[in-house]
């Protein structure tokens, strides 16, 4: 699982607003669903955010410069601590 934190949630061009209905918010953490390469560089599709497809059939993505990478999270360790804490 690859996590990123949104560090920039402004500066979208008006033409972007017609296709993007759901945006990442600064300070929120997201899971990368897929990396996308386009004319503008590398972007991300996020697990937590989906948008309607554009006329070209692609889902709008968010440029990687809007995010900072977080260290990988080992979910099994988190679940273990949670179970142990709860006495399960």
Image (cartoon, helix red, strand yellow):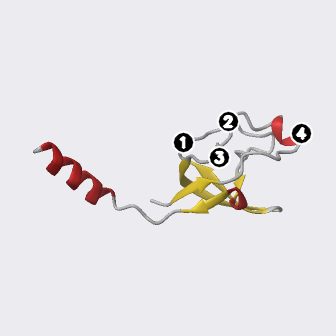
Residue shown at the point (72%, 39%) measured from the top left: 53
Q: Within 10 angstroms of label 3, few (less than 14), some, or many (20 or more) residues?
A: some
Marks 3 & 4, CB-CB < 8 Å contact: no
**Exactly how many numbered labels are in the figure?**
4
Q: Which mark is residue 59?
A: none
Residue position marked by numbered label 2 in the rendering: 22
Q: Which mark is residue 48?
A: 1
Give the structural element (helix, strand or loop) at label 1.
Answer: loop
**Earlier-in-chain disc, 3 versus 1:** 3
Residue shown at the point (27%, 58%) measured from the top left: 76
Distance of label 2 from label 3 (alpha carbons) = 13 Å
Q: Is residue 66 left or right of residue 72?
A: right
Give the structural element (helix, strand or loop) at label 3.
Answer: loop
Task: Give the quarter of the image for residue 39.
Answer: bottom right
- Residue 50, placed above or below residue 61: above
Q: Nearer the viewer, mark 2 or mark 3?
A: 3
Q: Is residue 70 left or right of residue 59?
A: left
Q: Residue furthest right?
A: 14
Task: Give the quarter of the image for residue 16.
Answer: top right
Q: Within 10 angstroms of label 4, few (less than 14), some, or many (20 or more) residues?
A: few
Quadrant of the image containing the N terminus:
bottom left
Distance of label 4 from label 2 (alpha carbons) = 14 Å
Give how far across and how far down residue 2 sits, in percent: 49, 61
Residue position marked by numbered label 4 in the rendering: 14
Quadrant of the image containing the C terminus:
top left
**Earlier-in-chain disc, 2 versus 1:** 2
Residue position marked by numbered label 3 in the rendering: 26
Q: Within 10 angstroms of label 2, few (less than 14), some, or many (20 or more) residues?
A: few
Residue shown at the point (56%, 57%) measured from the top left: 4
For this rendering, which residue is in front, 84 or 37?
Answer: 84
């Amino acid at each position: 699982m690859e996590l990123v934190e949104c560090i920039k949630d402004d500066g979208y061009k008006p033409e972007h607003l017609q296709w993007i209905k759901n945006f990442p918010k600064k300070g929120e953490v997201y899971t990368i669903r897929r990396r996308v390469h386009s004319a503008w560089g590398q972007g991300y599709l996020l697990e937590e955010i989906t948008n309607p497809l554009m006329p070209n059939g692609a889902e709008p993505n968010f440029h990687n410069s809007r995010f900072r990478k977080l260290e990988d999270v080992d979910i099994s360790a988190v679940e273990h601590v949670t179970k142990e804490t709860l006495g399960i």
